[in-house]
Amino acid sequence: MLSAAVNAIVQMFSAPFRLVLLKSIGVALLLLIVIGIALQRALSWLITNGGRWLETIVGPDVHGPANVLEWMLAIAAGLGLAAAAVFLVPAVTSLVASFFVDEIAEQVERTHYPADPVGTNVPIGRALIEGIKAAGLAILIYLCAAAFLLIAGLGVFIFFFASAYLLGRIYFELAAMRFHSAVDARRLRKAHQGTLFVAGMFIAAFVSIPIVNLATPLFGTAFMVHMHKRLSGRPTELIEQRP
């Protein structure tokens, strides 16, 4: 497992990966910016209209305190958006991975497993569906884990382990679907869920590093291509037909 992680990191600096790295970072940044603007506009609207509603209910005498409250809420919202970005990066990069899984995986397969059959490209529609489902599940679980962040120490561990589970699941299934149907990829993942949970800790540690975590789609996909080879047995003799 450690050698698979090292191989994935080393290959990230290879020439074929550089263009993919730039594209994946660009898409991840664009998605984070769009989501950030949407959240900022929504919070701004709620704060502004909330103040007006308060003045309508209580009366004009509350105008001064309402302005102070709006100002305090605006600061809290700004801090909240910064914190939200930390939670959103794993989900966003998981979605980005669905765009580039084949491009990344093929490079790893041809470089490290030249004697094995190359996987079949995952249809873009299927990859996007899996990416959106994974991102939605990530956000849901992170929202549940966020409540525990108020408990010193415990919240950090819960968030890390939740990330390990989700990222190990997402990236393994994307890599496995190049050789299996979506159903069989999930079955294979469940058969090795303990190993993949530990493997997910490597990706969770990677995604916790600011700025560097924008390259998570490359590391996570490359790493799980190696893990899939080890867990499914190589060479992969049969590429199953997808429905």
Image: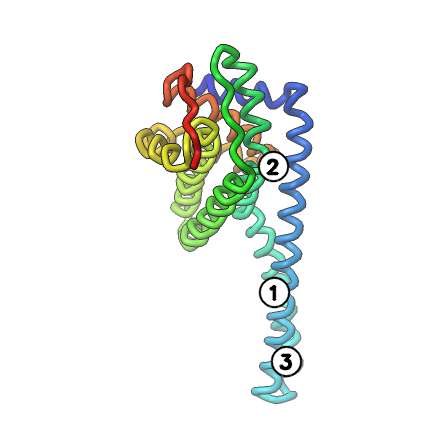
Mark 3 nearby-residue class (10 Å; few <14, some 14–19, many ≥20) = some
Q: Which mark is residue 43?
A: 1
Say which residue label 3 marks. Answer: 52
Nearer to us in this view, 24 or 132: 132
Residue 44 screen position, x and y as percent: 64, 66
Q: Earlier in the sequence, mark 3 or mark 1?
A: 1
Nearer to us in this view, 8 or 70: 8
Identify the image quadrant of the N terminus: top left
Side (left or right) of 58 relative to 197: right
The type of colouring in the image is: rainbow
Q: Is residue 124 visible?
A: yes
Q: Amino acid at mark 2?
A: Leu
Q: Which mark is residue 21?
A: none
Identify the image quadrant of the C terminus: top left
Q: Secondary structure at mark 1?
A: helix
Say which residue label 2 marks. Answer: 214
Q: Are marks 1 and 2 in contact (CB under 8 Å)?
A: no
Identity of the residue drawn at 65% across and 29% down? 20
Mark 1 nearby-residue class (10 Å; few <14, some 14–19, many ≥20) = some
Identity of the residue drawn at 60% across and 66% down? 73
Side (left or right) of 90 relative to 20: left
Q: Amino acid at mark 3?
A: Arg
